[in-house]
Amino acid sequence: AVRKVVEKIRSKKGHYLVALKDNNKFYRDQVIDEFEKAKSLDSARAKEMGHGRAEERKVSILKANEKALDEKFFTQWPDLKTLIRIERTRVFEEKRPFVQVRNEKTGELKHVKTGTQSGKAKLMRETQETSYYLSSKKMSAKEAMKEVRKHWGIENGLHWVLDVAFAEDDWLARAKRLSRNLSALRRIGLNLIRSNASLPKKSIRRHMKTAGWNDDILESLVFG
């Protein structure tokens, strides 16, 4: 499916920027190996503050080497030119009232109160994440940072709406299937509200409340 998409993009003389997911292990492992072997990298850094979070990003790029990468790379992603690595470090305040913390020495898990209750000290969390992207466009690290940021902007914008309207970050569902099903239902609900042109201009949250109070409005949202 991905191959057909990128081929269509290239046939229209456009450029693609594709995220390498964990399920693309064959390709992802090769890209990771290329970055680990590289003696020097074109890199760029950026820091941002917003929504109670501090984020630092480091972007590194490599030219796609046909001699080093498996030939399947260039069959799957035609005209591949650039390998991109994004290293992100985020620091943010924990929103949940309780979290599980593992003791580094004993491995024991314990519940810790966070700063969501009055009088309690705030608990700050730090996460680190490394992502990899492929692109048909030749670019510098600074250019890659801008392009990937656009990609994140779409995803982060959706996540922000889901968090504000549906309180997605407060859900504590741990079962993978349940989490996926709830996530799908929230996105369906959001799309139903956004796609209904007859609705007055109100916040997503207000439309949800109105639909909960009035069955006729709820029916019009679901069935049009």
Image (cartoon, rainbow, N blue to C red):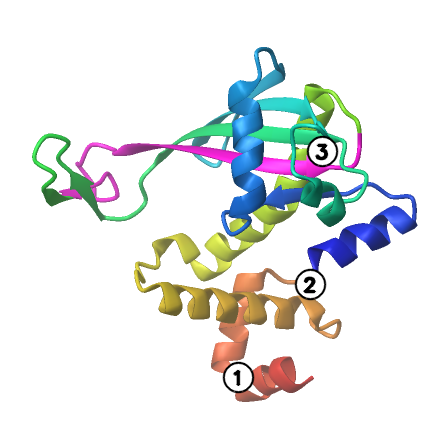
Image quadrant holding the N terminus, namely bottom right
Q: Is residue 69 left or right of residue 116?
A: right
Q: Which residues are magenta?
A: 112-137
Near mark 2 (Cα within 10 A), the count class, few <14, some 14-19 or many ≥20, is: few
What's the distance in space between the residues labelled 1 and 3, CA to CA? 43 Å
The label number, if any, that marks residue 147 in the structure image: 3
Q: Is residue 185 left or right of residue 217?
A: left
**Image quarter for residue 116?**
top left
The amino acid marked with disc number 2 is Lys
Whether 75 is drawn above or below 168: the answer is above
Is-magenta flag for residue 122? yes
Q: Amino acid at mark 1?
A: Asn
User: Where's residue 156, x and y in %?
Assistant: 57, 45
Q: Is residue 144 above or below residue 7?
A: above
Q: Residue at x 67, y 66 (%)?
A: 194
**Residue 41 image point, x, y percent:** 61, 15
Q: Which residue is at 60% across, 24% downward?
A: 59
Q: Provide the secondary structure element on which disc 2 rests.
A: loop
Taking 170 as reference, is 185 left or right? right
Which labelled disc corresponds to residue 201? 2
Task: Tell me the CA gap for discs 2 and 3.
Answer: 31 Å
Label at residue 214 = 1
